[in-house]
Image: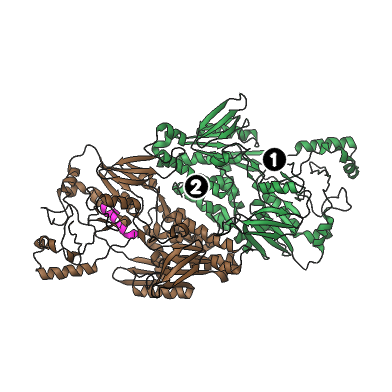
Chain colours: A green, B brown
Amino acid sequence: MHPLLPSGGGLVAYSDVRPFGSVYADAAQPTIKKKKVVVLGTGWAGTSFLKNLKDPSFDVQVVSPCNYFAFTPLLPSVTCGTVEARSVVEPIRNIVKKKNFNVQFKEAECFKIDTTKQKVHCRSIQNINIGGKEEFTVDYDYLVIAMGARANTFNTPGVVENAHFLKEVEDAQRIRRSIIDCFERASLPSVSDEERKKILHFVVVGGGPTGVEFAAELHDFLHEDLIYLYPDLEQHISITLLEAGDHILNMFDKRITAFAEEKFQRDGIKVQTGSMVVKVSDKSITLKERSSGETKVLPYGMVVWSTGIGTRPVIMDFMKQIGQGNRRVMATDEWLRVEGVPNVYALGDCATINQRKVMLLQSDRGDAAKQATRLDIEKFKSALSEVDHKMKSLPPTAQVAAQQGEYLAQCFNRMKECDENPEGPIRFRDSGRHRFKPFRYKHLGQFAPLGGEQTAAQLPGDWVSIGHSTQWLWYSVYASKLVSWRTRFLVIGDWGRRFIFGRDSSRI
Amino acid sequence: MHPLLPSGGGLVAYSDVRPFGSVYADAAQPTIKKKKVVVLGTGWAGTSFLKNLKDPSFDVQVVSPCNYFAFTPLLPSVTCGTVEARSVVEPIRNIVKKKNFNVQFKEAECFKIDTTKQKVHCRSIQNINIGGKEEFTVDYDYLVIAMGARANTFNTPGVVENAHFLKEVEDAQRIRRSIIDCFERASLPSVSDEERKKILHFVVVGGGPTGVEFAAELHDFLHEDLIYLYPDLEQHISITLLEAGDHILNMFDKRITAFAEEKFQRDGIKVQTGSMVVKVSDKSITLKERSSGETKVLPYGMVVWSTGIGTRPVIMDFMKQIGQGNRRVMATDEWLRVEGVPNVYALGDCATINQRKVMLLQSDRGDAAKQATRLDIEKFKSALSEVDHKMKSLPPTAQVAAQQGEYLAQCFNRMKECDENPEGPIRFRDSGRHRFKPFRYKHLGQFAPLGGEQTAAQLPGDWVSIGHSTQWLWYSVYASKLVSWRTRFLVIGDWGRRFIFGRDSSRI
């Protein structure tokens, strides 16, 4: 295994893991048979790849258990009916239909990737009447893995059984129904006031952007809509946001964290930091305070779990197969190629670009230094050390996944062109240059909606913006980012409807 | 049991089943404690009653397993995504909120009516965390039963397990998902063409207005939207409409039946009449031809069962309890009072107004004749016989239920007033007059949408209207009948969206 040096500041130093040249060279030959590209997943990365792929010389197969793309940043809005589930999804076949070349979609999940035979094994998600589920295989020349991640429970007992996640559209719909269920249940005459308080205690675990946005949306839903429909229950409602760290939104600027914590306090959302959840039963959560080690039991009516992401089992298996079994997340190089396997790419939440610490690679320094003769060795070391500090894994966001999908599609679109005129950096180990420039993430900022028509945003250049105007920025950015005019029309319609009629409270 | 004579032509002849006068008289007293009205159900009848009840001297409790009212005539549109599920529902609490007197809603199902203790036993529809479901009782002074009906399977084996009904909003949502599932399944590479034909064979059982409208909507959905998204599957699609009688839409004018059958033939919807379904398995339907007795097996991908309505088990139990155990449907008198029980009313699909044949009531003729001294006895007999011919049970439609709800609410609103000045017809058996005029159904016509922007309508006075203009009449009548401005806005928005973007095909 060899080092990967991402560009930090003006430093230019590259390596490649394996000489893929021979494999890629094929694409440059005049092709009689179209190259088969298989895309696994229809989330941000997969859909972005598909939308941006223009070269008609590929034969594309898309395999995903979802026959639609979901605009996930609006999922917290779907949980409370601010936006409808259908408004944030775009059928993949609508996207496929617009392509001027052959794209096939199959609603199935990939359960095994066979890199030696270059095929993926898939299984229908439906129970066919007799004999279980349909299975089939799909051959590939290039495989694009964009299967996303699963919710991370840290193996906390009871989470899968009792908590809601907030990753899929169906999750959001279930949460919505569950909120109304709690209110209807609390309205029954046979329920005591004490029990009512428990039923109407909503708990959010995880103080990241999703958890915070959900808590804020929920607060608005309860206080702008539901208390008018269930006036007797207002006194019993409470929301708690649990965060294991010291602050919520800790990936944001401190000003945003402070503003959010203050706003939540004003709104009556209880923020409890420094507590780990150790167990979730069907009606209570057991907490352990980090500092004192004390445990505490918190009864609840509904709990939403949003503490980050974990690797999917099928990816775990694949990682073992390709010698990455000891890693937590699948690694790619800076060209999004899965390390150790030719012609396989991984994008989005299911992989990270290998961020190996440069300073540990003493044995390889000689190699690298050869290419960096302009720097003396001590300067080089200090530069590398600085890079290490600046480097962080890219966040598991829609923005990263979408940019990676677009980047890879551009590479595929320009494959022939770049085979003839490589535009990438000089190779460390082979002669010549890389075909493509490596992937570079452009951070365009991140929003943290805080409810009550207030949003915080951390924009590039450490520009922080908080308040009503940012909410309008949020509206316009999200409207413009929606994948189609149809969804744009629907989401804007939903927002308008919410302003006029409020959110709907029927258990649908 | 005594006769009930509905007014036919100019004939006026009434009877009442029991002298309820003493019970009703209570309401005329100055009340210290408000009279408790319990409404079971939030369908057309219950909601119409609730909306029209204005007298603040009642204490109203509504119990229903649905916390919303559904505009059921648009359910066939929901199955194909022409209209969204949420657009056709109105939360009951939105309606309750607007009342100027105390109305309590409880999301629960009534499982027992106790007429001796004047209370209903209810059970939450949610599984409460521990110890099963919450149960409670509600006391009543007046009980309004508006629980609707269940789908009638005629005890055909396999229907409940394998067929979809089309009575609830959830049914429509399931059908929608199921249609897309069939298409996704048929797209898999491991499925043979023969199997594809089976999967894409959609069967509708029942040629009444709902079945016909669903078949028409489905045809439009398949041919206006899905074939563009699944172009390879067009050749495999088929729709069959099964009807046990000789013609579809047999409650309509013959011209409409003929038009519909012709249109369906042109559209390629196979209409198979004269065949009874004797069994539904997980992948095929067994038919028996009425004339020849031959059986035939029909493989299918999805089947929707829409052959009319049956009595709910809780109503069955209640009927046994009140001595109506030998009836198929619960009977009320013309004032919508359940026969044999004081202070209990039944409206909508869960009851019929007793339509006892007048000519059989020889023993009572003397009584009746006393009131009808203008007619000699032979003329009277022939008039009664004519009435018998004209009389049919009221159809189980939204229109009837809504009018009954409104009628009963008006009676409740004017209870005091009419106790003092009875406005009803002269009593047969007691002295004086009935308090209220009996319920009279005003038929405003019925629509039968046939797809392709064509609708047939049978309007009062045997006026038949068919075609595109009728579709626009349908749009405007349905838009105007929607319960709230919110649903009106949403449904019209959905129609507009469908015109612009087509129907959505994501499995949500």
Q: CA distance from mark 1 to mark 2?
A: 34 Å
Q: In the rendered image, which quarter contains the N terminus of chain A? A: top right
Q: Residues within 10 Å of mark 2 (few under 14, many from 20)?
A: many
* A416 or B427: nearer the viewer: B427
Secondary structure character of the magenta stretch overall: helix
Rendered location of residue B407, percent (x, y): 26, 54
Residue at 89% in and 45% down: A371
Q: Nearer the viewer, residue A183 or A433?
A: A183
Residue A16 at x, y percent in the picture: 83, 48
Secondary structure category for the residue under label 1: loop
Residue found 91% across the figure and 42% down from its top: A373
Q: Is residue B299 visible?
A: yes
Which type of secondary structure does the marked residue at label 2 adopt? Answer: loop
Q: With B433 as the anchor, is A142 left or right in this view?
A: right
* Circle on res. A461: 1
Residue that carries the numbered disc 2 in the rendered image? A81
The quarter holding residue B12 reads bottom left
Task: Name the amino acid, label 1.
Answer: Gly
- Disc 1: host chain: A
Residue A469 falls in which quadrant of the image?
Answer: top right
**Quarter of the image holding residue B140?**
top left
Foreground disc of the pair 1, 2: 2
Image coords of residue B208 (percent x, y): 38, 66
* Magenta stretch, residue numbers: B392-408
Q: Is residue B367 left or right of residue B295?
A: left
x then y, percent, for residue B48:
32, 53
